[in-house]
C-alpha cells in the first residue's frame, strides 16, 4: 500500500548530518558507529531511500530546516537569520541534486501530485521519491516578503515556529503568542496559497493564527495531548479546529510525543505502533470519520530508533500500521485514506493547478 509521509527531514540528515541516504541503513548506521559519532540519534538512523522504497513510502513532504538558536554551537541552531537562510537554501539544493540523479521528484502542482501517485502505484520500484517542499519553521524567511522567493523555489507548506520563540512568534515550550512580523507573513502565506503547518505553535500562537488566518491548514507531525499530556501535542479543541478547517493531522513516530513522561536520553521506549493507532482512532472519533488523519512520521528528526516505538526499527515498519487499523475495525478504504488518501486529497486542493 502506498504510504504518504508528511514530515521527513531528509535534507537535514543528508546535509547537516552528512548521511548518504542512497545507502542501505545498515551501512549508514555502521559508518556512524565507526566514526564514533555520539550525538543523540547517531548510529540509529531509520530512514534511507532504499528503506523508503521497501516500506512503500513513495511520496511525502521534504523539509527545509534551520532555526535561530542563541546558544553558540547548538547542534541544530544558527546564530543569525541569514545563516538560517543559507542552510535552508543548501537543503533546497540537496533536493535538486537528488532530482538530477533520479532519486527524488519535486511535486509543485496538482497535476504532478496525481501523476506521481499513479506512477508509484504502477511501478513502485523505479519511481523516485516524490516530495512536496515544506519549511519546518520560518526562521529562514528573511522578512515577510521574502516568502515569495521560497514559493518560487517550490515551497508549498510552512510552519512559523519550532522550539522556543523566533521573530514570528512563540513555538513549542514557549508561552508567548505571535509577533508583529507574523501578521504580514501570514497574509503573504494566505495570498500565495501556501498551506500553513500548525505543528510547533505555542498554544497562544495557535489560537491567534486560528483567529486571523483563512488559508488552508495542516499539522504535519502532531499527536494528541490526551495520550501524552504536554504542550507539543494538540488538545481536543485544537484537533477539532483542524478538522473544521478540512485540514489533516500527521501522526508522528517520535516517542517523546507518544509516551507520557519521556525524558530524552534517559527514558527507554515502552510504546508500540498500537499507541499510534490509538491516536489515529482518537482523531477519527472526534471527526466522526477517517478523513482528517494521516502519517507525518518525523523519523530521523534529530533522533533514531532509540526514540521510536519498540516495534519500529526502520521507516519500512510503517507498513505494519494498515494491518493494525484493519484489526481495529477500519475498512480498507479508511485504511487507504489514513495511509495516503487524505494527504493526496489535501494537497490536491492546496497545490496550484
Ligand atoms: Zn518538528
Image: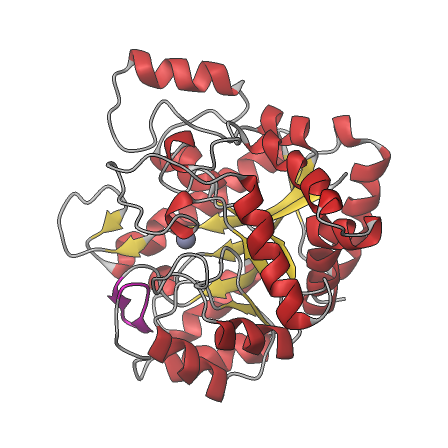
The correct choice, above or below, for 152 with respect to 47 in the image is below
| Left or right: where 316 falls relative to 197 | right
Foreground residue among 309 and 202? 309
**Residue 116 visible, this orientation:** yes
Answer whether residue 49 is magenta in the image.
no
| Left or right: where 209 falls relative to 338 | left
* Residue drawn where x is 45% and y is 81% of the image: 209
On the rendered image, what quadrant is the N terminus found in? Answer: top right
Q: Residue furthest left?
A: 72
* Coordinates of residue 146 in the picture (x, y in percent): 42, 69
Foreground residue among 33 and 16? 33
Q: Residue furthest front?
A: 328
Answer whether residue 165 is magenta in the image.
yes
**Quadrant in which residue 164 is drawn:** bottom left
* Coordinates of residue 126 in the picture (x, y in percent): 76, 27
| Left or right: where 122 falls relative to 50 | right
Query: The magenta stretch spans which residues?
Result: 164-173
| Left or right: where 25 falls relative to 290 | left
Amino acid at each position: 500500500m502506498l504510504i504518504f509521509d508528511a514530515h521527513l527531514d531528509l535534507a537535514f540528515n543528508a546535509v547537516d548530518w552528512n548521511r548518504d541516504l542512497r545507502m542501505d541503513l545498515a551501512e549508514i548506521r555502521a559508518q556512524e558507529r565507526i566514526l564514533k559519532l555520539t550525538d543523540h540519534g547517531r548510529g540509529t538512523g531509520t530512514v534511507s531511500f532504499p528503506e523508503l522504497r521497501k516500506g512503500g513510502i513513495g511520496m511525502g513532504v521534504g523539509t527545509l530546516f534551520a532555526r535561530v538558536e542563541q546558544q553558540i554551537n547548538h547542534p541544530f541552531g544558527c546564530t543569525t537569520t541569514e545563516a538560517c537562510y543559507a542552510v535552508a537554501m543548501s537543503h533546497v539544493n540537496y533536493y535538486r541534486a537528488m532530482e538530477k540523479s533520479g532519486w527524488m521528484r519535486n511535486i509543485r502542482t496538482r497535476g504532478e501530485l496525481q501523476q506521481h501517485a499513479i506512477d508509484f502505484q504502477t511501478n513502485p520500484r523505479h519511481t523516485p521519491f516524490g516530495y512536496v517542499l515544506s519549511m519546518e519553521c520560518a526562521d529562514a524567511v528573511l522578512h515577510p516578503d521574502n516568502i515569495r522567493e521560497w514559493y518560487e523555489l517550490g515551497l508549498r507548506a510552512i510552519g512559523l515556529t519550532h522550539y522556543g520563540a523566533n521573530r514570528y512568534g512563540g513555538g513549542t515550550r514557549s508561552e508567548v503568542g505571535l509577533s508583529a512580523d507574523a501578521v504580514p507573513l501570514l497574509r503573504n502565506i494566505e495570498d500565495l496559497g501556501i498551506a500553513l503547518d500548525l505543528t510547533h505553535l505555542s498554544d497562544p500562537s495557535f489560537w491567534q493564527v486560528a483567529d486571523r488566518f483563512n488559508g488552508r491548514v495542516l499539522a504535519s507531525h502532531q499527536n494528541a495531548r490526551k495520550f501524552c499530556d504536554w504542550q507539543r501535542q494538540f488538545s481536543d479543541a485544537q484537533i477539532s479546529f483542524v478538522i473544521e478547517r478540512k485540514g489533516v493531522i500527521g501522526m508522528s513516530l517520535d516517542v517523546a510525543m507518544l509516551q507520557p513522561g519521556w525524558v530524552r536520553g534517559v527514558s527507554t521506549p515502552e510504546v508500540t505502533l498500537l499507541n499510534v493507532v490509538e491516536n489515529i482512532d482518537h482523531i477519527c472519533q472526534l471527526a466522526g470519520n477517517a478523513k482528517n488523519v494521516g502519517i507525518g512520521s518525523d523519523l530521523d528528526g534529530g533522533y533514531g530508533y532509540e526514540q521510536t516505538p519498540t516495534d519500529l526499527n526502520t521507516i519500512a515498519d510503517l507498513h505494519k500500521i494498515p494491518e493494525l487499523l484493519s484489526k481495529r475495525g477500519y475498512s480498507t478504504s479508511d485504511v487507504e485514506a489514513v495511509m495516503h488518501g487524505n494527504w493526496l486529497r489535501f494537497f490536491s486542493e492546496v497545490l496550484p493547478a
